Image (spheres, helix red, strand yellow):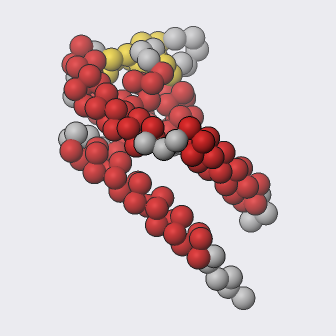
């Protein structure tokens, strides 16, 4: 027997997909791929010198996707790599990459901050708490597949 999707889940899925579409539109407006936007966004938040594995952990994208996107951003002149310990590769912004963050990523983060701070502090706390609880529950029940 196929279970029926809970009406609340239908709405949550719609909202989730709408948010993904909004981020896709942001990337398009900035003339970036979705993964390119994600990498630059994480570099903005983590700072120069982070590792590709840090980007994977923060974007939830695969190593292969991150590697391919980093290579493209390097070819475009926005990033450089420097060897670290072992096989670690640190990612650094070039001057053009730093300009890209200032011109394109910072305004996107400003928009996110505005959308989040339009909620009261209580709403922000509840929003985060409930999203974390849902993710934790989803992870827990996924082990039953």
Q: Position of residue 132 (x, y in %)?
A: 66, 46
Q: Residue 93 is drawn in which quadrant?
A: top left
Instruction: Give the quadrant of the N terminus.
Output: bottom right
Identify which residue is drawn at 41% across, 54% down: 19
Tell me if residue 121 comes above or below residue 94 in the rendering. below
Out of 86 and 70, give the one closest to the viewer: 70
Out of 49 and 101, give the one closest to the viewer: 101
Identify which residue is drawn at 28% across, 51% down: 25
**In the shown orientation, is residue 106 left or right of residue 136?**
left
Identify which residue is drawn at 34% across, 32% down: 110
Instruction: Give the quadrant of the C terminus.
Output: bottom right
Identify which residue is drawn at 45% across, 24% down: 45
Can I make out residue 5 in this image? yes
Q: Position of residue 46 (x, y in %)?
A: 48, 21
Can I make out residue 38 in this image? no
Tell me if residue 118 comes above or below residue 99 in the rendering. below
**In the shown orientation, is residue 80 left or right of residue 141?**
left
Out of 33 and 83, give the one closest to the viewer: 33
Out of 113 and 109, give the one closest to the viewer: 113
What is the tally of numbered marks visible in this picture? 0
Tell me if residue 68 comes above or below residue 106 in the rendering. below
Q: Position of residue 139 (x, y in %)?
A: 71, 53
**In the shown orientation, is residue 145 left or right of residue 70?**
right
Q: Position of residue 120 (x, y in %)?
A: 52, 41
Tell me if residue 5 comes above or below residue 62 in the rendering. below
């Amino acid at each position: 027997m196929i279970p029926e999707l809970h009406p609340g889940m239908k709405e949550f899925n719609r909202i989730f997909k709408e948010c993904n579409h909004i981020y896709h539109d942001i990337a398009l407006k900035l003339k970036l791929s979705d993964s390119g936007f994600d990498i630059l966004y994480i570099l903005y938040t983590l700072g120069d010198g982070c590792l590709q594995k840090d980007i994977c952990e923060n974007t939830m994208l695969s190593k292969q996707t991150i590697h391919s996107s980093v290579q493209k951003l390097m070819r475009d002149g926005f990033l450089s790599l420097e060897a670290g310990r072992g096989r670690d590769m640190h990612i650094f912004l070039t001057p053009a990459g730093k300009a890209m963050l200032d011109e394109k990523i910072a305004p996107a983060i400003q928009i996110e901050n505005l959308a989040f701070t339009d909620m009261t502090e209580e709403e922000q706390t509840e929003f985060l708490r409930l999203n974390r609880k849902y993710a934790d529950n989803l992870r827990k029940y996924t082990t039953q597949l």
